[in-house]
Image: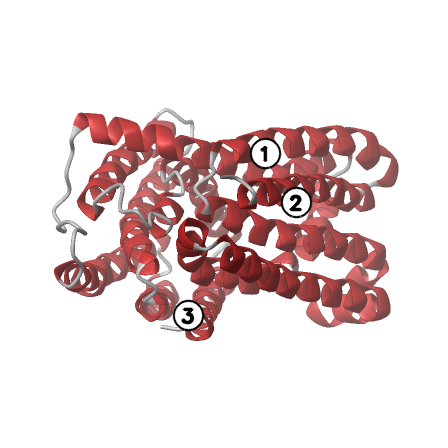
């Protein structure tokens, strides 16, 4: 399938899935209570970071494994082990916390939902490697749409969050078993040297794969910190109301990120092939991808500069319009973030993982220092400035690394 078609499918799938996830939250606020919203948010806040690390970006490693260093069965076995560790960690946090029984059960249930998601994700890595992105998008669309429908009906009639999440778990498990597993079996059946669907647990292979993937797991942690550190400082120096303004405006980063992520996911397997066989094509494709990110980022800056107050008033309320300067700095940081997404994909495609850890350490240190200095003085404008500083440093280092990789013998 062509890159254009792959990109289209990824974009459709990602946008639909993200919209349905957002719709689930809206339904919860409409039909539920603030307490239920808090329980749901707490469960995700505990489960998501843990799985973000234990998943170790295995999907990206699979997609770029153009030399077939590992079989799918080995990736699958490794994911089962790491997901078990992740779920055990979530259960431990929930049981040893001081939360009420209902909250504990919801945290554990969301941990199971995210576990199913992680199993689908490892299959998505196999599918992405073979550039059949339509299968991933259809799976995401099914999960997003059906979980939103069942969640909404359940919450409306039963007013019970546990039952509603249980239905999401049932839907995702069903789609995983019927659709995702079937796609994996068909792909493995028609692919030489790809391995079987049955997981393998060879100790030495698991160990090697763990140390290969570990740097990317650490990178995810740093990426999460780069997004959240300014929010910690805002809460410390100001209040939750100011954090609410900042978080709402910063959410506009997602608009461009959806497109940039689609570009990265659809093109990474091709980049990996080009890096091994033709550095000129690798450089050319990277340049095209980066150009798109630059255009998207520039349009965001232009919109924030010219009509930022109007955009904020329409999307939120008139109260947000006075934070046009925050919006502008957020879009400047988004410019560098989008470019970083592309350069990061290019580095991952070349299977250069360890340097990304160093870049994460440097950018996280930068945002810590910038937040400490700027936020007490500039408020939430300073928070957006701190993000801009960190992301600009990170993308500069990444582009230098891409140049080094291109010229590496």
* Residue 168 x %, y %: 31, 59
Q: CA distance from mark 1 to mark 2?
A: 11 Å
What residue lies at 64% left-to-right and 45% top-to-bottom? 399
What residue lies at 22% left-to-right and 31% top-to-bottom? 205
Quick check: 54 left or right of 78? right
Q: Quadrant of the N terminus?
A: bottom left
* Residue 402 x %, y %: 58, 45
Q: CA distance from mark 1 to mark 3?
A: 29 Å
- Report whether residue 29 is seen: no
* Front-lying residue, 369 or 130: 130
> Which is nearer the N-term, disc 1 or disc 3?
3
- Report whether residue 211 is seen: yes
- Give SS at disc 1: helix
* Front-lying residue, 276 or 355: 276
Asked whether the beta carbons under mark 1 and mark 2 sit within 8 Å of each other, the answer is no
Residue where numbered disc 2 is placed: 395
CA neighbours of label 2 inside 10 A, class few (<14), some (14 to 19), many (20+): many
* Front-lying residue, 138 or 63: 63
Q: Which mark is residue 360?
A: 1
Asked whether the beta carbons under mark 1 and mark 3 sit within 8 Å of each other, the answer is no
Q: Quadrant of residue 361?
A: top right
Residue where numbered disc 3 is placed: 6
* Image: 385 above or below 369: below
> Which is nearer the N-term, disc 2 or disc 3?
3
- Give SS at disc 2: helix
């Amino acid at each position: 399938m062509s890159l254009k078609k792959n990109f289209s499918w990824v974009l459709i799938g990602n946008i639909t899935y993200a919209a349905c996830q957002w719709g689930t939250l809206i339904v919860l606020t409409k039909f539920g209570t603030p307490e239920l919203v808090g329980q749901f948010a707490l469960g995700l806040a505990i489960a998501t970071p843990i799985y973000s690390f234990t998943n170790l970006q295995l999907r990206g490693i699979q997609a770029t494994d153009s030399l077939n260093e590992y079989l799918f069965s080995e990736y699958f076995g490794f994911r089962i082990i790491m997901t078990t560790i992740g779920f055990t960690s979530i259960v431990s946090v929930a049981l040893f916390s001081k939360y009420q029984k209902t909250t504990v059960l919801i945290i554990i249930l969301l941990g199971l939902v995210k576990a199913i998601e992680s199993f689908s994700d490892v299959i998505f890595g196999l599918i992405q490697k073979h550039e059949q992105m339509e299968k991933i998008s259809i799976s995401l669309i099914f999960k997003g749409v059906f979980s939103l429908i069942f969640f909404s009906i359940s919450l409306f009639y039963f007013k019970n969050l546990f039952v509603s999440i249980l239905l999401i778990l049932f839907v995702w498990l069903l789609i995983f078993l019927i659709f995702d597993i079937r796609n994996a079996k068909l792909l493995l059946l028609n692919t030489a040297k790809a391995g079987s669907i049955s997981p393998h647990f060879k100790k030495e292979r698991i160990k090697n794969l763990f140390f290969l993937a570990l740097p990317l797991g650490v990178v995810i942690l740093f990426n999460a910190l780069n997004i959240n550190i300014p929010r910690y400082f805002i809460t410390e120096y100001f209040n939750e109301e100011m954090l609410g303004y900042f978080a709402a405006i910063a959410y506009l980063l997602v608009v461009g990120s959806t497109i940039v992520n689609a570009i990265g996911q659809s093109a990474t397997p091709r980049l990996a092939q080009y890096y091994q066989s033709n550095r000129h094509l690798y450089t050319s494709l990277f340049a095209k991808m980066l150009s798109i990110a630059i255009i998207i980022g520039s349009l965001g800056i232009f919109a924030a500069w010219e009509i930022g107050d109007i955009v904020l008033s329409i999307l939120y309320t008139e109260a947000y319009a006075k934070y046009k300067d925050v919006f502008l700095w957020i879009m400047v940081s988004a410019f560098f973030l989008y470019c970083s997404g592309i350069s990061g994909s290019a580095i991952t495609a070349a299977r250069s993982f360890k340097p990304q850890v160093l870049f994460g350490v440097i950018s996280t240190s930068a945002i810590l220092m910038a937040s400490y200095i700027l936020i007490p003085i500039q408020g939430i404008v300073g928070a957006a400035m701190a993000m801009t500083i960190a992301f600009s440093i990170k993308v500069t280092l990444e582009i230098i690394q891409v140049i080094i990789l291109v010229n590496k013998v």
